[in-house]
Image: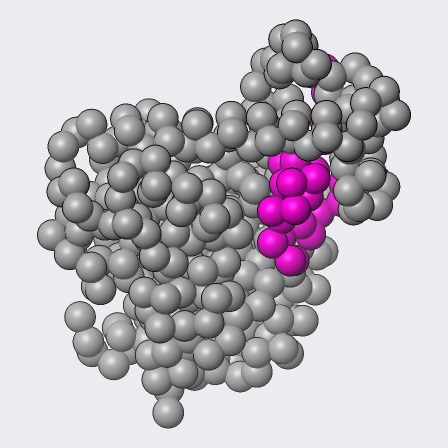
Amino acid sequence: MSVVIGWDIGGAHLKAAKVVNGRVEATAQAATPLWLGLETLHAAFDALKDQLGGADAHAVTMTGELCDAFASRRAGVAGLAAIAVRHLAPAPARFYAGAAGFAGEADVETHAAAIASANWRATAEVVGLRLRDALLVDIGSTTADLIPIVAGKVAAIGSDDAGRLAAGELVYAGMSRSFVMAMATRAPFRGVWTPLMNEYFASSADVYRILGALPDGADRMATADGREKTVPASRARLARMVGREADDAGPADWRALARWFAEAQTRDICDAAFLRLSRGDLPAEAPVVAAGIGQSIAAEVARRLGRPSQTFASLIGALAGASQCAPAAAVAILAAASLEGRP
């Protein structure tokens, strides 16, 4: 029996997936706000390792190298790799380097540019093993990845964040950590367009909590005001975005405002999808594969594109949690196949 645990080190969360004989059997995640320091990452590695148990090998991907704890991407890759190796010993850790495959500890510095922020490609590679053509739409807490798979191959135009942003393959729109002030510059409220307060008063978690659409466990960060995660508290935070207090209007008004912000975010992701699809390389019948905590949004994007959709978890025959931890599951699947000599 071979056991591989995949790890996705993000700037806000550490996610893990345990793959036994090629199948995802368990997933886990923890909040790790790296911009506040690396202590939470150390604790999360130990906690999730205890939760998932031992492994024959570990596979690691990351986006957390972008955080303020590091002076550069290269320094971030090296720093996160060192932390992973320390906590995952004695089993070996291999680092996903995109098209270059996996790199061992000794080769991390050489492959730092390819290792940085490559988690999206791991998920897309696994989709390509199961579908000839598809559009992967992975919407997480902070960003949305839109990656075409054409003839079983990852067909991304961009290879780094800059290129992916320009191609419509990366959108800074997430289901829990997006700042509401970044989702629009104005909003309709009680019949007038209202400019927004340019302050971090509320997040997308507040928007989706008010709508009853926030998945369980999706909001692991502190709220903008440090107060509770309840619908009334989210209304109060959202009200500040339009210069009001929660008791200035009724629940229906705040729900309507939240619905508008959710719609604005969905339109942003759809616009990116239409931009990428305008290249004409993805067949019209190719489905959307929805992943991330925002997979319900991805399904709506698929509907607007006129395409069928399915979840990443269903595609790989795993429990629903595999969709929320898709890159972690993907690197574990790819590493397990590599260790067994399978393509």
Where is residue 97 shown, x and y percent of the image? Answer: 33, 54
Q: Position of residue 151 (x, y in %)?
A: 11, 52
Q: Nearer the viewer, residue 318 or 325?
A: 318
Residue 233: percent from left, percent from top: 82, 38
Residue 104 sits in quarter: bottom left
Q: Is residue 180 above or below residue 137?
A: above
Q: Is residue 281 above or below residue 319?
A: above
Quadrant into which the C terminus falls = bottom left
The stretch drawn in magenta includes residue 23? no
Horizontally, residue 10 falls left or right of residue 135, namely: right
Q: What residue is drawn where x is 66% and y is 25%?
A: 257
- Whether the magenta-drawn stretch holds residue 202 is answered as yes
Residue sitting at x 38%, y 39% = 301
In the image, is 302 to the left or to the right of 322? left
Please indicate whether residue 167 sits to the left or right of residue 49 in the image: left
When the figure is inspected, residue 12 is found, relative to residue 122, above or below; the finding is above
Residue found at the very far right of the displayed protein: 247
Q: Is residue 282 above or below residue 151?
A: above
**Res. 207 in view:** yes
In front: 5, or 274? 274
Q: Is residue 54 left or right of residue 59?
A: right
What residue lies at 62% left-to-right and 48% top-to-bottom? 214
Q: Quadrant of the N terminus?
A: bottom left
Span shown in magenta = 196-223
Tell me the residue at 21%/63% (across/down).
Answer: 129
Relative image position of residue 311 (x, y in whole percent): 38, 58
Does residue 57 appear in this view? no
